[in-house]
Image (cartoon, rainbow, N blue to C red):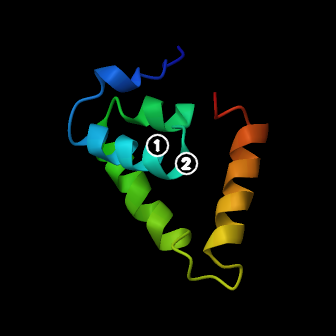
Amino acid sequence: MWIDPIRLNEVEEPAKGILEEIRAKRGAVPKILLTMARRPRILHSRQTMNMAVHGGNSTLGKRREELISYYVATIGGFYG
């Protein structure tokens, strides 16, 4: 069984706030996050983990971390 991403205009709080923040920063919301938005606790936990891992504290710096993340997500088909 495949779980389809939810449409951004159908998302309810608290997931909506998380996704709006992502859209404001990135310009788009990855499909994987729209799928996680079906279970807001999962989306929130993912964001907490993401900030711990990609919070700009590595030797790469925040800009490089974001570029690598975007590149990998684009290749994986998670944008669009």
Q: What secondary structure is found at the residue carrying circle 2?
A: helix
Q: Position of residue 48 (x, y in %)?
A: 38, 62
Number of marks present in the image shown = 2
Q: Quadrant of the C terminus?
A: top right
The one of 27 and 79 positioned closer to us in this rendering? 27
Q: Residue at x 51, y 73 (%)?
A: 55
> Residue under circle 2?
26
Residue that protrudes farthest toward the top in the picture: 1
Q: Position of residue 24 (x, y in %)?
A: 44, 47
Q: What secondary structure is found at the residue carrying circle 1?
A: helix
Q: Position of residue 78 (x, y in %)?
A: 64, 34
Indicate whether 14 appears above or below 80. Answer: below
Q: Residue at x 64, y 61 (%)?
A: 66
Q: Position of residue 17 (x, y in %)?
A: 28, 44
> Residue under circle 1?
23
Name which residue type carries label 2.
Arg
Mark 1 Cα-neighbour bin, 10 Å: few <14, some 14–19, many ≥20: some
Name which residue type carries label 1.
Arg
The one of 55 and 20 positioned closer to us in this rendering? 20
Kindly indicate the quadrant of the structure image that contains residue 10.
top left
| Marks 2,1: beta carbons within 8 A | yes
The one of 10 and 50 positioned closer to us in this rendering? 10
Left or right position of 39 against 55: left
Left or right position of 31 against 43: right
Indicate whether 68 appears above or below 1. Answer: below
Left or right position of 54 against 23: right
Residue at mark 2 to residue at mark 1: CA–CA distance = 5 Å
Q: Residue at x 54, y 38 (%)?
A: 28
Kindly indicate the quadrant of the structure image that contains residue 37.
top left
Mark 2 Cα-neighbour bin, 10 Å: few <14, some 14–19, many ≥20: few
